[in-house]
Amino acid sequence: MSQLIVTSRYLKSGNQKNKTKRRNYTKYIATRETVEIRSQKFVDRNANATKNQEQLINDLINDFPESKRYLEYEDYEREPTIENASELISTIVERNADVVGNRQNFVGYMAMRPGVEKRGSHGLFNEKDEPIILNQAANEIAEHKGNVWSHVVSLRREDAVRLGFDNSDAWRELVKRHISDIAKAQNIPLCNLKWYAAYHDTTHHPHIHLLVYSTNPKQGFLTAKGIDQIRSAFANDIFHDDLQSIYQEQTLSRDELKAVSKTEFESIVNMIASNDHTDPQLEELIRKLYIQLQNVKGKKVYGYLPMEIKETVNKIFSELAKDENIQQLYDKWCSLERLKYKTYTQKEAELPELVDNKVFQPVRNMIIRTVLNMKPFDANTEIEGSEPNDEYIDNTPQNMSPLFDDAEPLEEKETDESASAIKHYIKWNDQYKKACKLIYGKDAKLN
């Protein structure tokens, strides 16, 4: 099981039956027995003081006239706002607590003080601090002419408590942090996206219901990839600290694999140089790569090499990957990668073989650098497919004429008995190159 579960679907629009379903669903998620009731009364603390506050302040000043000397009273006199009134009331009560507690006219103080009342009968919330009137929100969603998407995002109880996601405020801030990710995943411009949510504090799997839609009914669609993007955004945030630990361990595992590969390959190369290597297949590949690299121009980095040289590097990497220590390190890296996937998906991660994993591309460049630093081989060493790029072996039978009349003829050389080891080459002359361009086009690549 994954640590974060996300299920998504859409609520159809159109006929009265679908509208009723939307309205009922909105009210259900906002009021069911496990929902956390949220404050729905918005207090503008810069607005004028309420009549209850004014009356309470007058009563307090009459009983405690010295309160007019308080700095809080000066602030209230200058700007009689809800916030300044609340500060003045709190200061008078705190400084005269021994007397206030015995007076009937202050029994209702806590109920009058802004910000402490129970301010709602449902759990619906969005990004705004304004109160949400449930019937209005339900009708708005029901009458929307486009699709409305419903997501349920849930955690295990132990993870919710451990990570602080056992309350609606934490979930609200989570959605607000990733609303742009949700908009992108659902192909809705951020400026047109609207959402409502409710947190359900169930016993085993606390979760939120999240309703998303666009003010433009024609906008928005959600694919499987989009659902994965939403799930990933939430999981990477909720399990940030857990994942950081996995990332660090995985980095150490990756670096160790590269270091062991380097040590192992350098050891193999040294044995070949000392004629002490027992794997003829790998030795032939390394010798072949050495000669190929001597005859290639430009950057000698894997990404810039011709395909035939890349194939040689890949074959060497495949042989190197068979090493038991390297394989164990890669298995460890894969187990950590699967652990990351498990954070937000129930599907088993399909991981490539080591030689096909782009994370370990640097191993190929390590192979190239190591081979380049080898001691030169015997110049007469023959490796199949290692001819220089701008030359070719002439295998034309002697009774055949050259392709072009003005091609340079072969030079016959008198040599000693070792001459049989010497191969003859024909250089590509200018006429030959021009002919190739006429045949193959101006884009033909000729050295």
Image: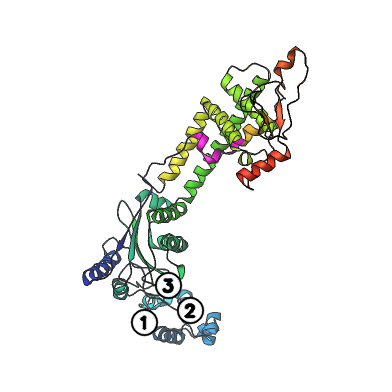
Q: Where residue 166 appears, x then y in whole percent?
A: 38, 56
Residue type at tag 3: Asp
Q: Would you place residue 328 above or below residue 97 in this image?
A: above
Q: Nearer the viewer, mark 1 or mark 2?
A: 2
Q: Would you place residue 55 above or below residue 445 in this image?
A: below
Magenta segment boundaries in residue numbering: 349-364
Question: Is residue 447 visible in the rendered structure shown here?
Answer: no
Q: Where residue 48 appears, x then y in whole percent?
A: 46, 85
Q: Where residue 209 appears, x then y in whole percent?
A: 33, 61
Question: Which badge, 2 or 3, is on the more N-terminal residue?
Answer: 2
The crowd level at tag 1 (other Cα within 10 Å; few <14, some 14-19, many 20+) is few
Give the SS element for disc 2.
Answer: helix
Distance (Cα) linking label 1 and label 2:
21 Å
Q: Quadrant of the C terminus?
A: top right
Kindly identify which residue carries mark 2. Answer: 83
Tell me the colour scheme of the image. Answer: rainbow
Q: Which mark is residue 105?
A: 1
Residue 246 appears left or right of 390: left
Residue type at tag 2: Glu
Question: Which badge, 1 or 3, is on the more N-terminal residue?
Answer: 1
Q: Quadrant of residue 206?
A: bottom left
Q: Quadrant of residue 58?
A: bottom left
Kindly identify which residue carries mark 3. Answer: 129
Q: Quadrant of the N terminus?
A: top left
